[in-house]
Image (tube, rainbow, N blue to C red):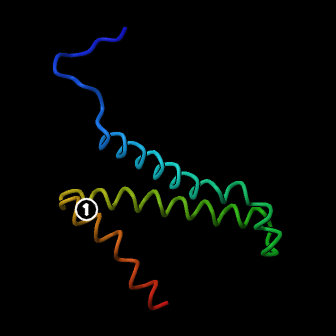
Amino acid sequence: MNTVTPGHQGLTLKTWLALIILALSTFTIVTTELAPIGLLTPMAEGLGQPESMIGLTVTLYAWVGAISALLSSLFLGNLPKKPLLLFLTLEPIPKGIVV
């Protein structure tokens, strides 16, 4: 059942672009988080370590990421979003230049 509310003209180009960017960023984040799981065996062979040790390392990394996400939403939730996003996006640039 498709009903259109009065005054509703559909999604604008700006809304579609925002949706596409959100989808691509979600895909990128999930892929980078899940890729090590599929690469456990080659990583273990390349590093000369048992798969269980590499799996534990990936698990610890996931726990740190989960706890960091919870704490950052708790402590950064009251800050204005645009300046925070801009800072978090640009902050790694000087580190990359120095390193």
The residue type indicated by label 1 comes to Leu
| Residue 98, percent from left and from top | 45, 91
Compared with residue 7, is residue 61 higher up or lower down, i.e. above or below? below
- Residue 50 placement (x, y as % from top left): 80, 67
Tell me which corner region of the image, top left, top right, bottom left or bottom right, holds residue 92.
bottom left
Residue 40 lies left or right of residue 16; in this view the side is right
* Quarter residue 75 falls in: bottom left
Front-most of residues 55 and 92? 92
Callout 1: few (<14), some (14-19), or many (20+) C-alpha neighbours within 10 Å?
Answer: few
Q: Position of residue 5 (x, y in %)?
A: 21, 16
Q: Label 1's element?
A: helix
The structure residue drawn at horizontal position 74% and vertical position 60%, both measured from the top left corner, is 40
Q: How many marks?
A: 1
Look at the image and tell me in which quarter the N terminus lies.
top left
Figure quadrant of residue 48:
bottom right
- Drawn side of residue 49 relative to residue 85, left or right: right
Image position of 25 with respect to 52: above or below: above
Residue position marked by numbered label 1 in the rendering: 76
Write the residue at 61% across / 53% down: 34
Q: As drawn, is 40 to the left or to the right of 26?
A: right
Q: Residue at x 72, y 67 (%)?
A: 53
- Residue that extends furthest to the bottom in the rendered view of this protein: 98
Q: In this view, which residue lies farthest toward the top?
A: 1
Q: Residue at x 78, y 68 (%)?
A: 44
Viewer-closest of 73 and 2: 2
Query: Between residues 97 and 9, which one lies in front from this camera angle?
Result: 9
